[in-house]
């Protein structure tokens, strides 16, 4: 019990606000009218062109506009801010937010790609650069990081997250918050983070966005909560409530998650904003008959700010006057919002500096950071016969497929103020990488309209070349919000392009540009090498070309399982064993009769242009007292001919406990750069936080027991060892 108590006391609680901020909040709140208070609870949208409407200016001048989204550029932001500060009675600055999900103007790889780097430092860098660019324009609040755990690649929003695992997802959540907020979010170049979408949004039935979710409390607490807890413990100033129905109570009206957990257990002191119109959509959910009931339910559940719909502003005056909603609930929401505005230094520094805006956007430093992130996010899925990297002495290269010239596909969904014109296409990048070669581009029309002539052209291009590069996958609008797909196959006739190129009998490699795991089996049996480039951002094409021709060695690994078929979904690595685990030899087991139950590529998968060997796994002590920490060590060696990065992964399995446990749980990882012939010892610490789990009573515990430890370079295979906690061998 003592160990457990020590553990709980050691867990970082959300940072407590300073006394000075609390005093300033209280002093300001005491002066506010009800209308001014409700103004702080309202966030409204800019126009499609990034300008503010006349109505927004009116509301700003009368102190009835707490925050906006989608008003862009230092000039427009400063104009609206000036309207508030020079006319309203209390001169409370407006908070300007925007969907900077993987970059503002310089676009980084999509978050699912960044997570594939298995390098929180890379994610922190992307967040820091994005914040620097966005804050220079006057934006002080990013609707990021999206930390939803996703086990269903049909869901279009897997592109925005870190994949299927809570341990890796938590590490990336911390990195995003650190990169955005730094140690002091009031400093220039720093912004407020917004961990979203609270909670369980990724578990939508059928993978269909905004879908219904049914999640047990155990699964919520062990799988979906952890990345949010990591963000809150890292000091995230805001969260965003989700659209989904969570076990019958929509996340935007769910007092258990919004107040009991977030405030009661986690002591979160920032504010919660609803998702776009989500308060009013409680009517569609059927838990509110009108805007007044929607406002009452959302506010009293714990949603502090209403995004875009206006049920708070339109109904709370009457609800408060009638005593249906206590004024204290309004005051607490206002307090949380003012607290964040003070912590952002918004009262001291409300305006953007146009000079900084010009200097920061698309700077050489931004582009260099985006290039590095793109290179480190690439995942080499297959490389039969070592056909990659291609030789730089090729005289003629065919570049095939619509995506080879689709710059928007490189930026992916939620590409902020990124412009496709800022990016080179893959075809451009291949030309730049091989200045002396002839590059034949056979790109066809759009993915959805590839013709027999396009297929024929691809065949001719490959025949005329020494090697062919087929660029295929999804266009930018095939993933992201409201973009679920019922099939994960390559859309359109792209596979036929690959087959036509392969039939030419020359070396053919494929580059995949996509926002989610795809079912690639037909492609994998058509071409020997597939490089997963995701949607790699403004500098992505250059990164792809560097990898194709060997100037970069792919070191990324998957953070989401790639299924063989859509019919296998949900399929994820940390599944339970069940009473009859799948077995080829025994008919009456949990398998399919029409195909394998195993994935195409498992969580953690990734190849390299070199090879790595793990050896000398040790666990010290092998028998540990409850509450103790065991140190796991393994040596990783690069026994190939060129430098490369290994991603060493540690998985745990507890075969027996009072509740069932996953067959594997990631509890440590390290990306290690090694020269040819170099070796290094990697160390992991396993303490109660890693070894413990929720018992049948839903309380965290670390009872005595045996653990299997596996260390490898994917979630399948590796070296194994035993750890016994609190008992005898
Ligand atoms: C959208 C998204 C959310 C985004 C918000 C503002 O509907 O669900 O992620 O931040 O609205 O654009």
Image (cartoon, rainbow, N blue to C red):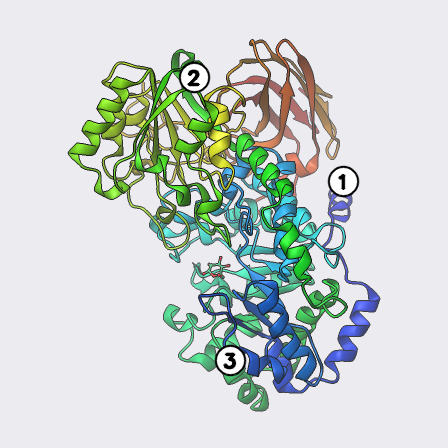
Q: Residues within 10 Å of mark 1 (few under 14, many from 20)?
A: some
For residue 54, the mark is 3
Mark with earlier residue (2, 1): 1
Image depth: mark 2 or mark 1 in front: 2
Taking 14 as reference, is 575 left or right?
Answer: left
Foreground residue among 98 and 87? 87
Quarter of the image where the N terminus is located: top right
Closer to the N terminus: mark 2 or mark 3?
3
The picture quadrant where one finds residue 615 is: top right
Locate residue 217, reporting x and y percent.
Answer: 52, 52
Quadrant position of residue 412: top left
Indicate the quadrant where residue 529 lies.
top left
* Residue 627 in picture, x, y percent from top left: 74, 35
The mark found on residue 3 in the picture is 1
Q: Earlier in the sequence, mark 1 or mark 3?
A: 1
What is the crowding at mark 2: few (fewer than 14 residues within 10 Å), some, or many (at least 20)?
some
In this figure, which residue is indicated by the disc labeled 2?
Answer: 390
Which residue is at 50% across, 50% downward?
Answer: 418
**How far is disc 2 from disc 1 in space, using C-alphas?**
56 Å
């Amino acid at each position: 019990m003592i160990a457990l108590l020590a553990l709980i006391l050691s867990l970082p609680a959300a940072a407590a606000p300073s006394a000075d901020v609390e005093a300033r909040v209280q002093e300001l709140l005491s002066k506010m009218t009800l209308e001014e208070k409700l103004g702080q609870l309202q966030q409204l949208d800019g126009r499609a062109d990034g300008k503010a409407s006349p109505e927004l200016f009116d509301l700003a001048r009368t102190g009835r506009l707490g925050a906006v989204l989608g008003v862009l550029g230092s000039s427009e932001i400063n104009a609206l801010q000036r309207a508030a500060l020079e006319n309203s009675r209390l001169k409370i600055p407006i908070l300007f937010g925007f969907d900077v999900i993987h970059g503002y103007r310089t676009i980084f790889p999509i978050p699912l790609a960044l997570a594939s780097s298995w390098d929180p430092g890379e994610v922190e860098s992307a967040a820091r650069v994005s914040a620097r660019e966005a804050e220079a324009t006057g934006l002080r609040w990013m609707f990021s990081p999206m930390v939803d755990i996703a086990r269903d690649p049909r869901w279009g929003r897997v592109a925005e997250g870190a994949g299927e695992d809570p341990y890796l997802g938590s590490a990336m959540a911390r990195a995003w918050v650190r990169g955005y907020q730094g140690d002091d979010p009031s400093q220039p170049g720093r912004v407020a983070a917004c961990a979203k979408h609270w909670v369980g949004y990724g578990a939508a039935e059928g993978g269909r966005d905004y879908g219904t979710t049914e999640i047990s409390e155990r699964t919520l607490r062990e799988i979906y909560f952890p990345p949010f807890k990591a963000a809150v413990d890292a000091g995230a100033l805001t969260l965003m409530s989700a659209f989904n129905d969570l076990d019958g109570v929509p996340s935007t009206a769910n007092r258990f998650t919004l107040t009991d957990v977030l405030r009661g257990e986690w002591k979160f002191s920032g504010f919660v904003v609803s998702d776009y119109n989500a308060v009013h959509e409680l009517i569609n959910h059927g838990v509110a008959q009108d805007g007044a009931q929607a406002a009452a339910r959302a506010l009293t559940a714990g949603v502090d700010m209403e995004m875009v719909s206006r049920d708070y502003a339109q109904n709370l005056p009457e609800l408060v006057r009638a005593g249906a909603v206590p004024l204290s609930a309004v005051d607490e929401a206002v307090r949380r919002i003012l607290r964040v505005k003070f912590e952002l230094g918004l009262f001291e520094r409300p305006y953007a500096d146009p000079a900084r805006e010009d200097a920061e956007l698309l700077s050489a430093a931004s582009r260099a950071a985006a290039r590095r992130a793109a290179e480190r996010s690439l995942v080499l899925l297959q490389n039969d016969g070592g056909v990659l990297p291609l030789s730089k002495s090729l005289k003629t290269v065919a570049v095939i497929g619509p995506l080879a010239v689709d710059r928007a596909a490189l930026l992916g969904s939620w590409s902020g103020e990124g412009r496709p014109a800022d990016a080179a296409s893959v075809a451009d990048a291949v030309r730049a990488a091989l200045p002396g070669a002839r590059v034949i581009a056979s790109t066809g029309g759009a993915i959805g309209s590839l013709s027999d002539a396009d297929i024929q052209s691809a065949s001719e291009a490959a025949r005329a070349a020494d090697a062919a590069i087929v660029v295929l996958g999804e266009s930018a609008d095939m993933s992201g919000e409201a973009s679920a797909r019922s099939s994960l196959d390559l859309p359109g006739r792209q596979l036929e392009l690959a087959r036509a190129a392969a039939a030419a009998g020359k070396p053919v490699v494929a580059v995949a540009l996509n926002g989610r795991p795809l079912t690639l089996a037909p492609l994998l049996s058509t071409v020997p090498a597939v490089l997963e480039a995701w949607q790699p951002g403004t500098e992505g094409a250059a990164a792809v070309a560097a990898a194709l021709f060997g100037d970069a060695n792919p070191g990324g690994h998957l953070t989401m399982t790639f299924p063989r078929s859509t019919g296998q979904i949900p399929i994820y690595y940390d599944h339970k064993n069940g009473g009859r685990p799948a077995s080829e030899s025994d008919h009456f087991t949990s398998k399919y009769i029409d195909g394998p139950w195993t994935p195409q590529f498992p969580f953690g998968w990734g190849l390299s242009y070199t090879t790595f060997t793990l050896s000398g796994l040790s666990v010290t002590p092998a028998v540990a007292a409850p509450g103790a920490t065991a140190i796991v060590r393994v040596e990783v060696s690069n026994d190939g001919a060129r430098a490369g990065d290994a991603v060493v992964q540690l998985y745990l399995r507890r075969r027996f406990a009072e509740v069932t446990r996953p067959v594997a749980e990631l509890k440590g990882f390290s990306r290690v750069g090694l020269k040819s012939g170099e070796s290094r010892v990697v160390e992991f610490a396993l303490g109660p936080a890693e070894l413990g789990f929720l018992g049948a009573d839903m309380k965290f515990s670390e009872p005595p027991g045996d653990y299997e430890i596996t260390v490898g370079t994917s979630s399948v295979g590796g070296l194994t060892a035993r750890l016994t906690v609190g008992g005898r061998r």
